[in-house]
Amino acid sequence: MYNHAQLKDLVEKALFNLSLPCEASRLAETVKYILSAGGKRLRPVLTLMACNIFTDKIDHAILPATGIEVFHNFTLVHDDIMDNAPVRRNLPTVHTRWNVNQAILSGDIMAFIAMECFFNLPPELLITVLRIYNKAAIDVCTGQQLDLDFEKVPSVTEKEYLKMIELKTASLIAASLKMGAALGGAGIKERDLLHELGINLGMAFQIQDDLLDVYGETKIFGKTSGGDIAANKKTFLYVKAMELATGELLQTLKTLFRDKNNDPDEKIRKVKEIYNVLNIRQTAENLTNQYISRAISLLESLPVPGDRKEELMTFVLSLTGRNI
């Protein structure tokens, strides 16, 4: 069995050795910049962990897992353009360091580089894996569209928000686990169980990211603190605050998110004060823990020996201690 660090190292080596477009040096430069910026490599590591649960032979899964990471980074490049985000992983975003056109093109080619990572699989497995991948890719784009739509409406319900993050964030994490299980030879029931586990992991992960935006340290989180508030993003914290706030508190919150001329630092401070009054942090943490508990329960029910699940269980439990 491989541990988390070993799996991450396999992914890093595969990313380093990817074939990039040598005919256009600027394009290769930007893609290399994106892929070498670090990150948790959460999705490919989960793919390899899931594969390793069912088999000790995971070499054939390394490149497909790497493809998932390339696709994920492609979505981040385009998300950063749409959000006008200046920083990603403590580095200037691609459109900030170069320009928007360069960022769009770099993201575009990464989508096709990701696809190339699947083509060494045998035909019968290739079809299974590509169906999982394509479904997740469509879900991610659908979730991003919903996120953009939310910017144009005055309010969003908790149910609507949770569906959006299920598509935009959780679906790719779930697909990573399901794909890994398929690559490891797991049956349909086991693949589906790990997919549901991944949905719960992804939901917990995104809500924690919403929390980190407000309560995390920039040097740890890798983004500007309060960036979602400054950008009027409808995160879980905002949605829940709008649901719970009444009277003057509600009017103040609406005004802060409606007025585009507010000083960003002052706006972040005032919104955070409202969140604290409404106990939003605890509410978000409670929901996160519910999702993590469900993921643990699903993993415990997976019909394989306990030692085969140990590394994935350790990872799931580690989410309860993210730096918030």
Image (cartoon, grey):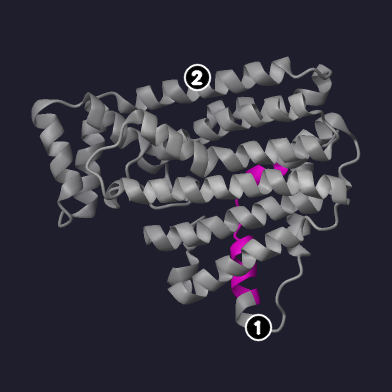
Extreme-right residue of the structure: 57
Q: Is residue 309 magenta?
A: no
Instruction: Report whether 183 appears left or right of 287.
Output: right
Instruction: Tell me: residue 263, above or below residue 129.
Output: below
| Quadrant hosting residue 26 | bottom right
Residue at image position (40%, 60%) is 82
In magenta, the rendered stretch is: 28-45
Q: Between residue 153 and residue 321, name the one nearer to us.
A: 153
Query: Under tag 1, what secondary structure?
Result: loop
Q: Residue at x 73, y 53 (%)?
A: 66
* Image coords of residue 241 (percent x, y): 26, 30
Is 36 within the magenta?
yes
**Residue indicated by mark 2:** 290
Q: Decide if residue 226 is in sight here.
A: no
Residue at image position (51%, 75%) is 102
- Give the quarter of the image for residue 297: top right
Q: Amino acid at mark 2?
A: Gln
161 sits left or right of 115 in the view: left
Q: Is residue 115 above or below residue 25?
A: above
Q: Quadrant of the C terminus?
A: top left
- Residue 106 location (% of width, % of height): 57, 70
Label 1 crowd (10 A; few <14 / some 14-19 / many >=20): few
User: Which amino acid, mark 1?
Assistant: Ala
From the top left corner, tell me how far across and down residue 81 is, in percent. Answer: 42, 63
Crowding near the residue tagged with mark 2, few <14, some 14–19, many ≥20 C-alpha atoms within 10 Å = some
Q: Which residue is mark 1?
A: 24
The secondary element bearing badge 2 is classed as helix
Q: Is residue 85 left or right of residue 116?
A: left
